[in-house]
Amino acid sequence: MSEKEMPQYGVVVGFDLTVPDADRVRDFYADVLGWRAEPLDMGGYADYVMVTADGTPVAGVCHARGANADLPPQWLTYLRVVDLDASIDRVRALGGAVVAGPKGDPPGPRYVVVRDPAGAHVALLQSEA
């Protein structure tokens, strides 16, 4: 893998919004921003990958159920980390807290939602790309 192909760490890799009424919020952002919703099967219901007019994925709108039931109802930024377990240890050592997770199973990415010392939430995601 060339240096150009290596994953960058500490960068934003996605945004999700998890809410009780994802269908209504999906329609809101589609109408306001011109996004199109592509259903993502969650086993019995669909969450949504929101894409631009040219098909570029920009965000997710998710139902607050199943694996997402404990996520805060806010736009959640996902940041890529090298080692999720080490990052969790650093969060706790520096006055933050784990809010949800770790979640995800190999071969997919693992992530955790944390609260920083100021009370803001962010998701840390361990992935290869």
Image (cartoon, rainbow, N blue to C red):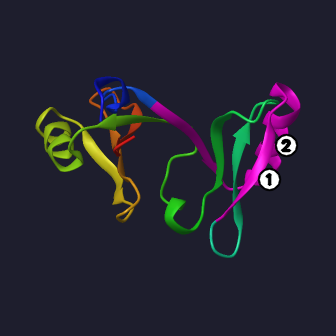
From the viewer's perspective, tell me whether residue 15 is left or right of residue 26. left
Dot label at residue 27? 2
From the viewer's perspective, tell me whether residue 27 is left or right of residue 13. right
- Judging depth in this view, the residue of 127 and 46 nearest the camera is 127
Dot label at residue 23? 1
State the residue lying farthest toward the front.
2
- The secondary element bearing badge 2 is classed as helix
Q: Which residues are magenta?
A: 13-41
Q: Residue at x 33, y 42 (%)?
A: 114
Q: Label 1 amino acid? A: Asp
Q: Quadrant of residue 34?
A: top right
- The secondary element bearing badge 1 is classed as helix
Q: Residue at x 14, y 37 (%)?
A: 90
The x, y position of residue 56, in whole percent, is 69, 33
Q: How many marks?
A: 2
State the residue lying farthest toward the left.
93
The quadrant of the rendering that contains the C terminus is top left
The x, y position of residue 47, in whole percent, is 68, 57
Can the viewer see residue 76?
no
The x, y position of residue 127, in whole percent, is 35, 46
State the residue lying farthest toward the bottom.
44
Q: Give the vertical position of 33 relative to 82 (above or below).
A: above
Can the viewer see residue 96?
yes
- Judging depth in this view, the residue of 97 and 38 nearest the camera is 38
Q: Label 2 amino acid? A: Asp
